[in-house]
Image (cartoon, helix red, strand yellow):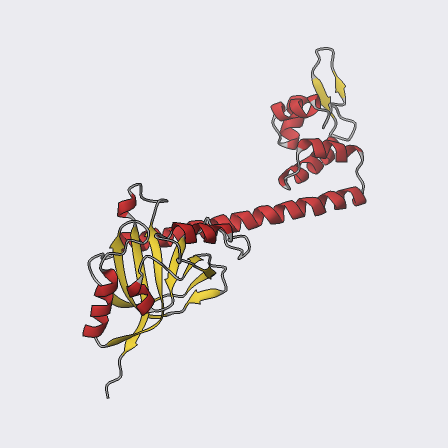
Amino acid sequence: MDDSTLLSIKEFSNFANIKQSTLRYYDEIGLLPAVSRGENNYRYYLPYQTITLNFINVLIDLGFPLSVIKDLNETRTPENLLKLLKQQETLLDSKLHDLQTAYSIIHTYRNNIQTGLLANENELCVHELAEIHYILGPANDFTHAKTFYKPFMDFCNLANRYRINLRFPIGGVHDNMDTFINAPGQPNRFFSMDPRGNRKIKTGNYLTGYIRGYYGQLGDLPERMASYAKEHNLIFKGPVYVVYLLDEISIRDKEQYLSQVVVAVAKKKLN
């Protein structure tokens, strides 16, 4: 076989490892025309057309549409290809960022749901918590709010300013245990559980409790946590975090949402 050998569409299909239906389509749209037609209207190709086919396949793998490939095939220069490659690189950078974000959201929800399914809801305990990164929102204003709805909507409206992706699970943080006990349904701030955040719940020992109910409905959990700490000679250190492990994403009945409350603790020093 040499470059002047005419190959039927079947022979070229086998030679180039491409479906006959694809060759017919490429011919119809003028992307890879057959070099000739026989008396029976059969398509015939030359072996060197595999070079053009390789050009087409490379650009298809890079995500270029066939219309762009056809235009480039007719005006192919290094400069034209470089321009298109830069454009495609920018597009793929954006898609890659979106995929990485989607992966992070999935991973975060998986962790929350698995923790919720394994939770002993009736027991308070102290355990070591792994480091959790998050993005903190602005201070909440509950001055004229009876529920968390108005402050939460303010948080959502300001999300772009704080570079907060609202697709990640949202939590609430209280400045300390006193503010949590006094107003458990009114966190000082909301936060996004975005693992790319520059804030973090540090690794350490945390008193942990769980409660079923709608957002802000924490029942007697604050008092039970305070009593537990007193009985076990524990002191509270720093903020109280409310993480909504099971919410509307995984549960239909809002009264069955599951919140996890964690606060760092340490043994009280004896005099």
Q: Is residue 201 left or right of residue 26?
A: left
Q: Position of residue 241 (x, y in %)?
A: 36, 62
Q: Is residue 240 above or below residue 16?
A: below
Q: Position of residue 103 (x, y in %)?
A: 47, 50
Residue 107 visible (yes or no): no
Of residues 176 and 96, which is closer to you in this image?
Answer: 176
Of residues 44 and 156, which is closer to you in this image?
Answer: 156
Q: Residue at x 34, y 59 (%)?
A: 242
Q: Is residue 206 left or right of residue 131?
A: left
Q: Position of residue 247 (x, y in %)?
A: 34, 48
Residue 124, picture quadrant? bottom left
Q: Quadrant of the N terminus?
A: top right
Q: Is residue 62 above or below residue 142?
A: above
Residue 214 visible (yes or no): yes
Residue 56, picture quadrant? top right
Q: Is residue 10 left or right of residue 169?
A: right
Q: Residue at x 26, y 84 (%)?
A: 269
Q: Position of residue 266 (x, y in %)?
A: 30, 76
